[in-house]
Amino acid sequence: MALEHADVQRAAHLARLGLTDDEAARYVDDLGRILEMVDMLQGLDTEGVAPLAHPLDVTQRLRADEVTESDQRSCFQRCAPAVENGLYLVPRVVE
Amino acid sequence: MHDKTLAELARSLEAGEFSSRELTQHLLGRIDRLDGKLNSFITVTYDQALAAADAADKARAAGEADLLTGLPLALKDIFCTQDIKTTAGSRMLDNFISPYDATVVEKLKAAGTVSLGKTNMDEFAMGSSNENSHYGAVKNPWDLTAVPGGSSGGSAAAVAAGLVPAAIGTDTGGSIRQPAAFCGITGLKPTYGRVSRYGMIAYASSLDQAGPMARSAEDCALLLGAMAGHDLRDSTCVARGVPDYTEELDTPLAGLKIGLPREYFGDGLDPQVEAAVRDAIKVYESLGASVREVSLPHTHYAIPAYYVIAPAEASSNLSRYDGVRFGHRCANPADLIDLYKRSRAEGFGDEVKRRILIGTHTLSEGFFDAYYKKAQQVRRLIRQDFLDAFEEVDVLMGPASPTPAFDLGAKKDPVSMYLQDIYTIAINLAGIPGMSVPAGFAGSRPIGLQILGSHFTEARLLNVAHQFQQATDWHRQRPAFAEENA
């Protein structure tokens, strides 16, 4: 499956990754070669094979629905770039 | 002191030949003098190391020392450490100080070990040469013009150079085993779920696993025992008892059935690597093992499947770096989208961006079935290859890497770098454990023998590796770099 400039810009937007047009052009080449390698998978017959998401056949563990975490907001916000009154600051979203 | 194994150092500490403080000071001094040439550490924690060494000496004096008390090690900079910077080799986390310790860090601290610092790595563990680090490439102590391997290249180089007796790495597609091979040390990737991933910065969550890198299989056994075990904070960490991994080390190998996967000895394998691996197999035969050829028919689909699954998981995992809650934030964002896009564009390096883009593309509408679902189906076939092989044999053996360490800057094309992991990557897809042990040299560059077992057979692998190390002295070789600077 060939990859085009618009595909790379679309993926970059979905991933919220800023790319200049020059960078995108370079990634068209790189990603194209990677996808070409990946396309080898299409030649393998996997009819009826169940997808494997996890290497061990285990099920998700459940626990009682109890509050176990304490409030550590100030601790977690120490590594934030900008906070005020316990809130994370971002550019204005609603005018 | 600096070329001893952990087991030897433990005996010296116990006998009072030197204290943990003396040992720690000696190694910190070596890091100061030598690491400028290697770049294996991102952060050296002098004060914390000496305080931990003093606490260890005190515990020993009070008769409260355990097996690992006072032994120095280093942590790949992917493990969160409270109050100490954790970068994952990325500009994105250059200012990140974790509010908590990873479970592995917590366990190793509780065992009394002394961390000397955080080792260099490929950014977010994406790479096979340690050239993708924001903090610069690491050099191989066996040959300063060669790469140390990756992504745990700093851990491997530091151990090989005698800066620290052991280090903890992580392995998503070969990132413990390949650098261990390139640097002539012993490394173990445990079964997926054996060691908690809590606090280990995520790359590809269904593949990532932490493990020990050291100078002997015995040392890996000691460390794995301290690292492994159930953890409620990682839902994929298995509830299964942790055996004493040193107990089976001395079991004789008579009757051991070794399989050699035909696909691991084909085109692209360096003849010197092949010769060293075949010589190692002969050593095993002399120890009473039998050898037969087996087949892992889907081997060549492993790299393509991996480069769908791992980037897909990475694109999801790395979406957390948004410039809002932690990590790099761009200056003067115009709006929220600009904040995200520029913070991520500035914070991530080239290879990380490549994998985020691949993962986002393959997971996007219209492509999911052709890529992600297909790769997961192939993943089942790859795992089945191993399960079938382990019906016939106890362990599989082959090269850890198709070539010895390559030159710095030699692999500019991403796909040629990816193909380096041909013998290691399927193991992560299958979730089985694997080791690399030193088995010879190509000129000055070490060669690693890879040993693979079925799920949760770490004790057996360590036994098989240890018996080889009783019969050979490849693991005892030290680079001239470490000795000239003794």
Image (cartoon, helix red, strand yellow):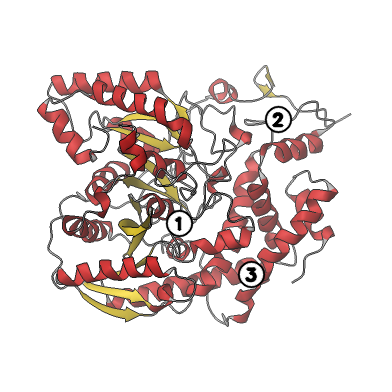
Instruction: Determine the residue positioned at 32% across, 40% down.
Output: B166
| Side (left or right) of B57 relative to B342 | left
- For mark 2, give the secondary structure: loop
Callouts 3 and 2 in the same chain: no
Q: Chain of mark 3?
A: A
Nearer to me, B33 or B286: B33
Instruction: Locate residue B266, reporting x and y percent.
Output: 45, 76
Task: Look at mark 2 in the image and give the residue it sits on.
Answer: B329
Percent from the top left, x then y, of residue B456? 30, 59
Residue type, mark 2 in image? Arg
* Secondary structure at numbered mark 1: loop
Q: Is residue B394 left or right of residue B35?
A: left
Quick one: B428 or B233, which is closer to the camera? Answer: B428
| Residue B241 appears in view | no
Same subunit, labels 2 and 1: the answer reads yes
- The residue where tag 3 is placed is A37
Q: Quadrant of the N terminus of chain B?
A: top left
Q: Which amino acid does the dot numbered 3 rest on?
A: Met
Chain at numbered mark 1: B
**Quadrant of the image for the C terminus of chain B?**
top left
Q: Is residue A76 above or below residue B294?
A: above
Query: For mark 1, what is the residue?
Result: B174
Asked if labels 3 and 1 share a chain, the reply is: no
Left or right: residue B162 compared with residue B124: left
Q: Which residue shows up at 19% across the image and 72% down it? A: B285
Q: Are the residues flagged by discs 2 and 1 in contact, CB closer than 8 Å?
A: no
Q: What amino acid is at disc 1?
A: Gly
